[in-house]
Amino acid sequence: MEDGSDAVDTIHHLQRTFEANQWSFMPVYPRGHVQIQNHLPWGVFNVFFPVVLTTATLWCVRRVMVVLVPPVGRRAGIALHGKAWLEPGGHGRTVDWRRFSNVVHCTLLHISLSAYVMRALWAELSDWFADPSLWWLFMQPSLSPSLRAYYLFEIGVTWEATLTMLGGVLTGRPCDTPMMVHHAATLAVLLFAWRFGFARVGAAVLAMHDASDVPIDVLRLGQALESDTLIYSGAAGAVLSWAYLRVYCFPRYVIASAVLQTTHLRVIFAFMGPTNITAGYVLYVAPLVLLWLLSCAWLYELLSKVLAKLVGSPPCARLARFASDPKSGSVRRRSREEAQR
């Protein structure tokens, strides 16, 4: 309970150490901005060892997949398009098979992690989305073993992806730069949330993003293999999942609750002064808003590509054409009808 003696003692400790200039934004270890019972963020055996083990294991798995996946991908392409697909001038000759292997690796990870969430964390997720204020309680119970394992595994996954993309950039693959920056930024957010006590909301964001990444992975595999079935199913799934999970659920539950359901934290940390509190909100909420805006932009780009594939031009081009000549659409329709007659 937030009004218990533990909460009072913790608040007094935070205030004393702040006034003694022992911290300005990051509370003295292991305290956070919210407190998780028995939470030691940087434990050697219960944090660093599992993360390092996960990172090393996934690095080895990715190296193996770089060897095993391309032959399977080539056989799949031949099955879909015939042997000419791999001959000079065929699309198979232009496929970046290393990148294809990385996409397969990510696809399997996203599917496995999403299945784990559905199996082991669904009850906790349901409680959080039914009452998002649970993410922001000042005193929180210990993390369940399943949730703790999931979060540490995700840190390891992101570490490995960041190092892999960095290695690609350093060995002459500038195309890996955007993903390296993406994974590095994700890793920083994961570590900050873990250190400051926001592991539960961090896990919820990870779950939403992993689930919405699966159809994007399917779309990329379809593009590499020129499979219309994978392309169309992946595109449809990506549009629906991104629209619901990233563009609607993310601001509806995460951003809104971070702003509207944290009044008690402003009261608790009043000793920091309004300037520091405002700066803290900006540091926490601004990245969430930026992430949401990027998701909106990526969804629009995806929709533009899908519509361009289906009707021949992106929505902006059609809107611009309609603005310059509102009758253009009806004129073209009449022309087609006359030609058919």
Image: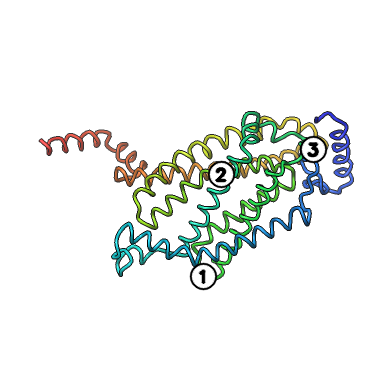
Instruction: Answer left or right for 205 relative to 280.
Output: left
Tell me the element at label 1: loop
Tell me the element at label 3: loop
Residues packed near mark 1 inside 10 Å, few (<14), some (14 to 19) or many (20 plus): few
Question: Whole-percent x and y of residue 336?
Answer: 17, 38
Question: Whole-percent x and y of residue 88?
Answer: 30, 70
**Which residue carries the number 3 mark?**
273
- Image: 301 above or below 174: above
Residue visible at 55% across and 66% down in the picture? 63
Residue sitting at the far left: 341
Residues packed near mark 3 inside 10 Å, few (<14), some (14 to 19) or many (20 plus): few
- The residue lying toward the viewer, choosing from 289 and 171, is 171
Q: Quadrant of residue 317?
A: top left
**Which residue carries the number 1 mark?**
172
**Which residue carries the number 2 mark?**
115
Q: Report, in whole angstroms, how far the alpha carbon at label 3 lies from the one at label 1.
A: 49 Å
Give the mark nearest the N terminus, 3 or 1.
1
Q: Amino acid at mark 2?
A: Ala
Give the mark nearest the N terminus, 2 or 1.
2
Between marks 2 and 1 in the image, the one whose residue lies nearer the viewer: 2
Give the mark nearest the N terminus, 3 or 2.
2
